[in-house]
Amino acid sequence: MFRSKLKTIFLASAALFMAFSLIAFPQEAVSASIRGLDMWLQIVFPSLLPFFIVSEMLIGFGVVKFIGILLEPFMRPLFRVPGVGGFALAMGMASGYPAGAKLTARLRQEGQITKTEAERLVSFTNSSNPLFIFGAVAVGFFNNAKLGIILAMAHYLGNLTVGLIMRFYGHKGSKQKPVKKQVTIRAALSALHKTRIMDNRPIGKLLGDAVMSSVQTLLMIGGFIILFSVVNKLLFHLHITAFFAEAFEIVLLVFHLPEDLSIPFISGLFEITLGSQLISKIQEATLMEQAIITSLILGFCGFSVQAQVASIIAQTDINFKPFFFARIIHGLIAAFYTFILWEPVYERFYNTEQPSNTVPVSFLNKESPLYANIGHWAELGSLITIVMLAVYVIIYARRMVFTKNS
């Protein structure tokens, strides 16, 4: 009882502190809010929406069940999850977070995986997409496309390593299901047909449900992006980021890393985009040191993404603690992989044009052709977002009218 009251006091105090901070720094809060809105409007929404809609339709048509049966001999022995986890893993890597959590929650709601299997699956199916690692981080912030090879290798190898580690989660409470010795296309096609018949929704209804569900999830994601963009900015101006950075400087000194990386690291714990950009501007650190810390925050994926995942899996009985634990492991392992792969991979094959302590250049240089391409896609992304939001409103209004008439 006392613990519950203490939690209530803490949450109320945090909300009041947030409100007073917004009053004290209104201009900074508005600029941070606009920055988060631009990111969601131009990049996040148009990039994730197609994956969300297609995944919902694939689940409804039984294609995910078909893929699950074929991947069962691979996913079950390695990660102790059903074969449908392979679909969630592939889509999570292709589209980025929080697509893995969205698909895992959907599979759990469909009853295709157990609670323990869902907690294992969500822990290693949420990763950054290649476009963000290569385009935004490597090229955009560091002006070094070859750096994306190391960051991607460390990130995805770390992700798979987390999956192998998390296979031991819930080992005592669940029994390993036997894997079928032989998987046939005929059995997979039969399961696909049965799943589609059991769903029994017309194509128009299925497509409408997919759009509605996807847009609702993306609206929630946009709210978290804006919120944590503002929180990160306020913490910086309130010198709270600097306070925690001083404590983290001790850890950096132990690993012989520059103290100047402390503030970018703390910022990256809240939002990976801002953290990666700040890391790229630290001239006192070598490129290898910058890459190690960047891999760490990419693996941890920031409290903003974690809050999005927590909100998605809250609709199910999936526990958030295994996911948070996995993010810590992923960050540390990705940083370790970056360190051990740097000399044999980057220094030997890719570091032929510039030294490892090259000063990064921001991708926001208006004279570069990359800036023009990004501007073009940003305008297109905004248009896609506005059109799909209009479609969502139309579908929602028609369903409301139908509900009232019936």
Image: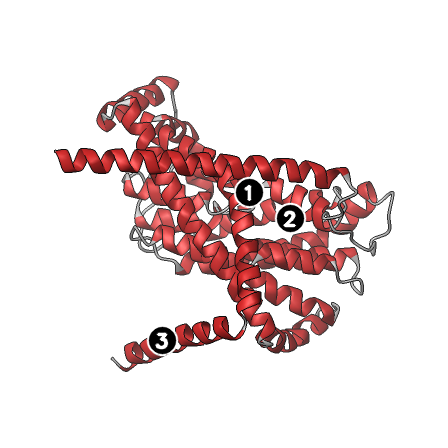
Amino acid type at mark 2: Ala
User: Of the numbered discs in the image, which one, if any, rests on residue 319?
Assistant: none
Q: Are marks 3 and 2 in contact (CB under 8 Å)?
A: no
Q: Is residue 349 left or right of residue 341?
A: right
Label 3 crowd bin: few (<14), some (14–19), many (20+), radius 10 Å: few
Nearer mark to the viewer, of 3 and 2: 3
Q: Is residue 309 left or right of residue 196?
A: right
* Quarter of the C terminus within the rendering: top left
Amino acid type at mark 1: Gln
Q: Residue furthest top?
A: 186
- Asked which secondary structure carries label 1, the reply is helix
Q: Residue furthest front?
A: 27
- Picture coordinates of residue 267 (x, y %)? 60, 64
Compare residues 283 and 34 and report the one nearer the observer.
34
- Where 208 falls versus 221 (above or below)? above
Instruction: Name the residue: 47% across, 60% down.
Output: 227
- Picture coordinates of residue 345 (x, y %)? 76, 44
Which numbered disc flags the more N-terminal residue, 1 or 2?
Answer: 1
Which numbered disc flags the more N-terminal residue, 1 or 3?
Answer: 3
Residue at the disc numbered 2: 154
- Picture coordinates of residue 72 (x, y %)? 40, 33
Amino acid type at mark 3: Ala
Residue at the disc numbered 3: 12
